[in-house]
Amino acid sequence: MKRLVQAPNTALAHLWTAQLRAAGFDVSVQREFAGGIAGEIPVDQALPEIWIMNEDRYTSARQVLEDLQNLPHRRWHCPGCGELVEGPFDQCWNCGADRPGAFL
C-alpha cells in the first residue's frame, strides 16, 4: 500500500478514487474524517489521502491522476442550441448535444 496523493477536500478525494477505480486500480481514501480535528493537528495532516493497494501500479495510477487534473480546456458553440460551452466538456450543458468531433 502506497500513498498516491493528498486531496484538498473529501469531495475530490472521492471523485478521483471513483475515476481510478473505473480505470481498474484498487485504491482507498484514508484520513477521510480527519478534517474534524484540524487545528488540533497540522491542517496538512488532516487532509484526505488516496492510497493504492498494489504498489507496482503506482506509476500508471499517478499518470491517470495527472490526466484527470489537467483536462483540456475547450471553447465551442453547441451545434444544437448555439450555446457557448467552455471547459473540458464534450456535451452542451444546456441541451445535451455532443461537441463536434467528440469521441463519446
Image (cartoon, grey):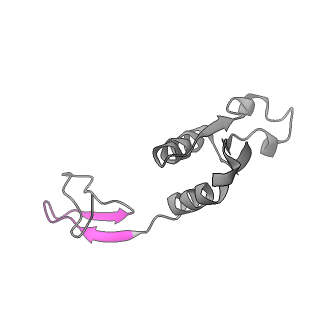
Q: Is residue 22 on the magenta stretch? A: no
Above or below for 34 versus 53:
above
Above or below for 97 versus 37:
below
Q: Position of residue 94 (x, y in %)?
A: 22, 52
Q: Residue at x 20, y 64 (%)?
A: 78
**In screen coordinates, is 29 left or right of 16?**
right
Residue 58 found in image quarter: bottom right
Residue 59 found in image quarter: bottom right
Q: Position of residue 22 (x, y in %)?
A: 46, 44
Q: Residue at x 52, y 65 (%)?
A: 70
Q: Position of residue 93 (x, y in %)?
A: 27, 52
Above or below for 22 versus 75:
above
Residue 46 found in image quarter: top right
Look at the image and give the residue range highlighted in magenta: 74-87
Q: Residue at x 60, y 42 (%)?
A: 13
Check the picture and name the quadrant holding the C terminus. Answer: bottom left
